[in-house]
Amino acid sequence: MKKLLLCCLFLPFWSLTLRAEPAELLTDHPLAGTLWHVGEKRQASPEELFAAAAEARWILLGEKHDNAEHHRIQAEVVGAVGERERRPALVWEMAQPEHDAVLKAATAEQVDGLGDAIQWEQRGWPSWPEYQPIAEQALKYGMTMAAGDAPPAVRRNLGKGGSLDADTAADIGWSRDYNDDQRRRLMELLALSHCGMLPEKVLPAMADVQRLRDAWIAKVMRDEGAEDGAILIAGAEHVRRDRGVPWHLLPLEDEMLALAAVEVVRDVADPEAYPSFDPEQFDYVWFTARVDEKDPCEAFRKSST
C-alpha cells in the first residue's frame, strides 16, 4: 500500500513529466469523496472544513500532483475562504522566485496564459488548466499570488553537498534542523519513493533539499501573509505538520490548518489504515478516487534507463 501512496510526492527529484488526469478509478470506493477530521477520527462536511480554513491564518492544501480532483478541492477551499472575506496570499510550491513578479501582476483576464508565462508545463508540472481554477478563485477575491519555491541554483548546490550563504541561512531559519528521528524517517521515505534505486550516500543531501524547500516556503508564507495569512498549494509531503512547512512555521501551529487530499487504495476501506490518517501530520484528510493503479516504480525505472 505504501508504494501506491508515494507516487509523485517528490516530483523535483524525478525526471518524469506528469499529467493531471481525471480521478476515474475506484469512484465507488467507500471512502472516495469523504472528508475526515483526523484528530477526532470522524467524518466531516466540506462546510466544516471551509469554516475552519477561514479561521486559520495559515492554510496548507496538500495534493497528489497528477490528480485533477485534488486541484478542484484546492480551488473550492480557496474560493470558500475568499467568500468569507479573507484575503490571504496564495503561495505556489510550483513557482520559483523568477516567476514571482508575473504572479503578483496577474489579473483574471490573464489567467489563461499564466501557465505559459511562468513555464509551468515546460518545468514538468501537470497541465496548467487543471490548476487554473485555483488561480481564478484567488484572483476573483483579490488575493495576491506568490512564488514559494527556493531558487533552483540554491537547491542544486545544496543537493551536491554545498552549503547556504550566511544571509540565506539566517533568513530562512536554517539553524533549526531535523532531529535524528525526523531525518531518518524522511530519508527512508525518499529511498522508498525512488524505488530503492538511489545510492544511500545521496539521501542526506536530498533530505537537506527537502528541508530547504519547506523552510523557504514557510518564509514566503510569513512574508506574504503578514496582513491576512497565506494559503499554500503544494504536494502533500510539504504540508505535513511533523516535518513539512508547518514545522517551519512554528510556533504558529494553533493558527494553522493542514489538509491532505489522498487517493483511495483498492480494498482498503478503513481510513486509519492510511499513513496520512495521522493527527501529527494533517488536520483533515479528503479521500478521492484514483488516477490509476500503475506501479510508480516501473515508470521510474524506465525514466532512469
Image (spheres, helix red, strand yellow):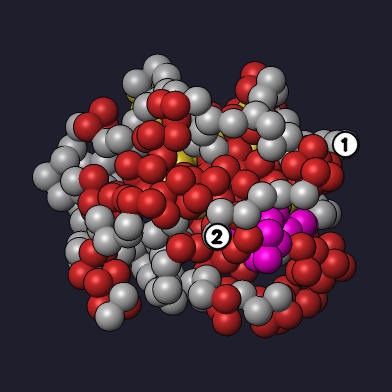
Using a 10 Å C-alpha cutoff, classify the residue at mark 1 as few (fewer than 14 neighbours), some (14 to 19) or many (20 or more): few
Q: Is 110 left or right of 35, judged from the image as shown?
A: right
Q: Which one is earlier in the sequence, the residue at label 2 or at label 1?
A: 2
Question: Does residue 153 lie above or below 263 as drawn?
Answer: below
Q: Residue at horizontal 65%, vertical 79%? A: 119
| Region in magenta | 145-155
Quarter of the picture containing the C terminus is bottom left
Q: CA distance from mark 2 to mark 1?
A: 37 Å
Secondary structure found at label 1: loop
Q: Is 291 left or right of 125, judged from the image as shown?
A: left
Secondary structure found at label 2: loop
Q: Residue at horizontal 39%, vertical 59%? A: 8
Question: Does residue 45 lie above or below 233 as drawn?
Answer: above
Residue 198 in sight in this render: yes
Place of residue 190 in the rendered image (x, y in percent of width and height, measured from the top left): 37, 49
Question: Does residue 22 lie above or below 89 as drawn?
Answer: below
What amino acid is labelled 2 in the image? Lys
Using a 10 Å C-alpha cutoff, classify the residue at mark 2 as few (fewer than 14 neighbours), some (14 to 19) or many (20 or more): few
What amino acid is labelled 1 in the image? Glu
Q: Residue tagged by mark 1?
A: 227
